[in-house]
Amino acid sequence: MKIVILGPPGSGKGTYASRISERLGIPHISTGDLLREEIRNQTETGKRIESIMNKGDLVPDEVVISILKNRISKDDCSNGFILDGFPRTIEQAKKLEEITSIDVVIFLDVPDWVIIKRLTSRRVCEKCGAIYNLLTNPPKQEELCDKCRGRLVQREDDKEEVIRERLKIYKEKTELIIRYYKDKGLLKTVEWKKEDIPEEEQDMPLSLMLEKIMSLLNA
Ligand code: AMP
């Protein structure tokens, strides 16, 4: 099965994608990871895209598509794959169709307030960079890193105003892609509904959302 997963930043998209990958035995392909690997290996492409990625801008289509095309031609993709971080634009969605056919597009419809709550709860250690979440992965002692006793701080881009801005940009771009796949009859929406989710899982309803996704995939 060839799957695309779409969802806002902070929706847990990467986590769901890797769980689905384990369950179905198909690779989880994140274009962000593939591009970071090029930079780590200091390939020609890696050198070209480093400054673009550092600014948080989109890497040119021809670069991402060529890397992706190469990745999905590998043997482990013969039974399918789950794509995370691609497509980011309509042009990419159209190009994707030229290189392969997608069976289903999962859209994680998570409300803004959940994302804001989750991301504003993230803390990072000033000293060693360890990441915590006050809701889902709290440190043993408030404001102190378990590993090195460094001070825990909130990153600039985890502040509420910045998150709201990121969500605005995400929506402008993704709404078009969602419509595109809806019109093709490929879209399956997984709704995050407060009333469905047990109290202890309100901050990260991993198992419930995962089961919803698996049943939509009939797997
Ligand atoms: P991510 O790990 O998905 O947040 O992606 C990290 C960065 O990789 C993005 O900010 C972009 O610079 C780049 N990137 C990942 N996927 C794409 C894509 N489909 N098109 C263009 N750039 C991408």
Image: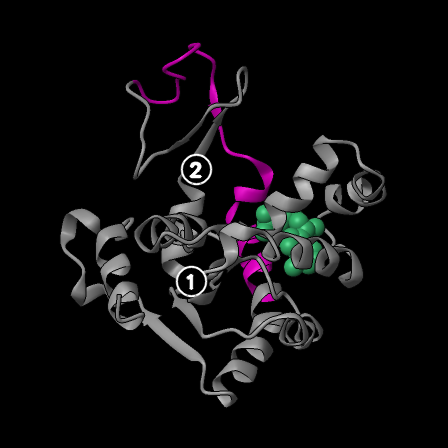
**Which structural element holds mark 2?**
strand
Q: Amino acid at mark 2?
A: Arg
In the picture, which quadrant includes the C terminus?
bottom left
When the figure is inspected, residue 94 is found, relative to residue 124, above or below; the finding is below
Residue 32 among magenta residues: no
Q: Residues within 10 Å of mark 1 (few under 14, many from 20)?
A: some
Residue 183 placement, left or right of 219: right
The residue to which callout 2 is attached is 122
Residue numbers of the magenta segment = 141-168
- Closer to the camera, 169 or 206? 206
Residue at (79% x, 47% y) in the render = 52
Sequence-wise, which precedes: disc 2 or disc 1?
A: 1
* Disc number placed over residue 72 in the picture, else none: none
Residue 112 - label:
1
Q: Between residues 108 and 17, which one lies in front from this camera angle?
A: 17
Whether residues under marks 2 and 1 lie with C-beta atoms below 8 angstroms apart, the answer is no
Residue at (34, 49) in percent of width and height: 19
Q: Position of 208 compared to 153: left or right?
A: left
Q: Position of residue 60 (x, y in %)?
A: 79, 59
Residue 109 in the image: state x and y as whole percent.
Answer: 39, 68
Q: Amino acid at mark 1?
A: Asp
